[in-house]
Image: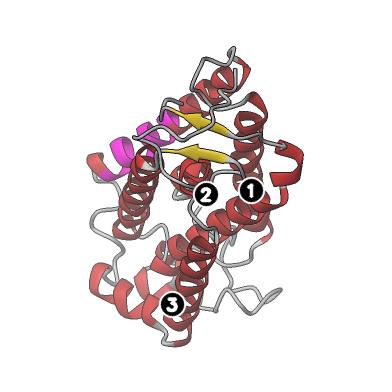
Amino acid sequence: MDLSLPRPAASARRPYATKPMVYAWLVITVLTVGWDLAGLDMAVMNHIGTPEGFPLKDNWWLSTVLHDKLRLVAQLLFVVLLAWASWPVRAGGLPRRERWLLVGLVLASLLVVNLIKINSRTSCPWDLQVFGGEASYVSHWLLGVGDGGGGRCFPGGHASSAYAYFALCLPWLCPPAGAVRSAAPGWRWLALVLIVGLIAGFAQTLRGAHHPSHTLWTLVICTGISISGWLLGQRWLGTKTQVLTGKP
């Protein structure tokens, strides 16, 4: 239930402005575009791969732990997220509408990344001729232009297993109008999502499965969907003045 109090609790903070979050997204987007324009993908991959392929492609830690197991954990987390959204609201917890909005934003991020991916004609680095494959390097921005490979490798689907959960930091870092909350849970979610996403993307790059830009664009897409969806959903939330303890 909502706690309507005349004054914020001492441990709570006033709502963070959403503008800093939007500005941060714009900076990440500009840096990612700059990475593409500088052609840094192949510069990195040439230091990792060889004409015979990628030595770490089948590394157990990278392929089993940081790929298969991590994806399974992300799937289980979504199940937990659904259960949490359906669970009765505790005193000091997030309103149910906010929980379901978060579920929708996570799902939207996953769907958009995968829709782009299955329609992409960009092949993975390990499919390129320079690394023993059959494809030629073609920028992912040359839409509709095939590279001679199997395609379906842009953006990074595995990184989205983490970045799709970026939305979970927003209720505390960008709370609805009238809500006064501790920012600590939001910072923890933000750090966890960014670190796990970076590890997942780096593991795939070492294996030759994705260029670095694939991970960067996944971050841009998922954060963009989460921030815009959260802002658009504020009127639907209709949050009254409330003070939350920081519990989910």
Q: Amino acid at mark 1?
A: Trp
**Which contiguous range is marked in magenta?**
62-73
Element carrying mark 1: helix
Separation of residues labelled 1 and 3 (CA atoms): 23 Å
Residue nearest the observer in this picture, 69 or 108: 108
Q: Is residue 27 magenta?
A: no
Count the marks. Answer: 3
Element carrying mark 3: helix
Looking at the picture, how far across and down is residue 5, in whole percent? 54, 27
Rendered view: 182 above or below 224: above
Element carrying mark 2: loop
Looking at the picture, how far across and down is residue 185, in whole percent? 38, 37
Residue extending furthest front? Answer: 6
Q: Residues within 10 Å of mark 1 (few under 14, many from 20)?
A: many
* Label 1 sits on residue: 230
Looking at the picture, how far across and down is residue 57, in whole percent? 30, 52
Q: Which numbered disc covers residue 174?
A: 2
Q: Amino acid at mark 3?
A: Leu
Q: Earlier in the sequence, mark 1 or mark 3?
A: 3
Q: Amino acid at mark 2?
A: Cys
* Label 3 sits on residue: 31
Q: Earlier in the sequence, mark 2 or mark 1?
A: 2
- The reply to whether dot 2 and dot 1 touch (C-beta < 8 Å) is yes
Query: In the displayed structure, does residue 183 sit left or right of residue 242?
Result: left
Look at the image and tell me whether residue 184 can be seen.
yes
